[in-house]
Amino acid sequence: MSPTLVRHQLPHSGSIRCDDPPAPDRSRRTRDWAEIQERMLLPLYEAAYDRLGIGPGTRLLGLGCGSGLALLLAAARGAQVSGVDADESRLELARERLTPEGGPEHTRLVSGGLEAAAPGDAAFNVVTAFHPVGCVGTVEGLTASLTAAAGLAERGSAVVLGGWGPVERCATAGVLGVAQRLADPRGDCAVGSAGGWPSGRDDLEELADRAGLRPDGSGRVACPFGYADPASAVRGLLSTGLFDAALEVTEERQVEKELAEALHPYQRADGTVWMPNVFRYLIARTR
């Protein structure tokens, strides 16, 4: 099965909006995500893959695959991978990573639903939904996507869900509070420190239950966010999509200024920025 990358709009409704920024900003932020921010979650990917023994024989579907780092790591272990994402520019970068020759024989980019990602020869046996950062829509929309993905997987297949660990162990939670405050100064909209992604102790289990999945283990892993300097930190965090709502109502310069101020306590003497975080993953099974 050749790697398949599908442009898929995750269902969403309610108060969380994921409107795309203008094209130049979107392109810049896509590159910043791929070059600065995405690697921060590498320990999460590796921990889950080690736990599941990802390798030859794995047929993996990545929901919200972004620019493809998690898929690339799975492919390097011998897995057959497919990915879906709502962001066309991130998918293009994933294509560059997974199919450096760029030929259509190596990958397909299909505009449509999850069914377009289904392998032709066998069902998926692993589904991942890693990203607790980034714009993923509402819990209801994510539940619908997981339910649809489970329908493309073998019975008993592993489904990996990612989320923030305890708030007190995630230094970045306070910095992300800037996004919520600027987007909703009156505090009427509960966006949450993880942009709507489950982050409480039992939220991943509740999400799995909503999608008809059976929890089958969990783990925690340190995922510190480290940057060469404050400017890189600002660019990386803005690339997550968590500040998009703030940028709709506040000038970008002001958002950057307040974000830089929030990062100041985490700047080291050598100018680098370091924020310890703990992330959590849940392994569930399709029924």
Image (spheres, helix red, strand yellow):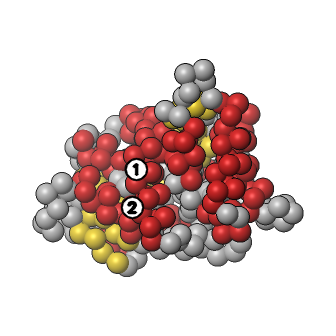
Q: Earlier in the sequence, mark 2 or mark 1?
A: 1
Please tell me how crowded label 2 is: few (under 14), some (14-19), or many (20+) other residues with Cα within 10 Å.
many
Place of residue 195 in the rendered image (x, y in percent of width and height, measured from the top left): 65, 57
Residue 78 place in picture, x, y as percent = 22, 43
Task: Determine which residue is flagged by label 1.
Answer: 34
Q: Residue at x 44, y 59 (%)?
A: 28
Kindly check if marks 2 and 1 are in contact, taking CB atoms under 8 A apart as contact.
yes
Identify residue for label 2. 90
Tell me which amino acid carries mark 2: Arg
* Amino acid on which the number 1 mark rests in the picture: Ala
| Image quadrant in which you'd find residue 1 | bottom left
Above-or-below relation of 1 to 77? below
Q: Is 249 rendered above or below residue 242?
A: below
- Element assignment for label 2: helix
In the picture provided, is 109 more to the left or to the right than 1? right
The residue depicted at 40 percent of the width and 36 percent of the height is 46
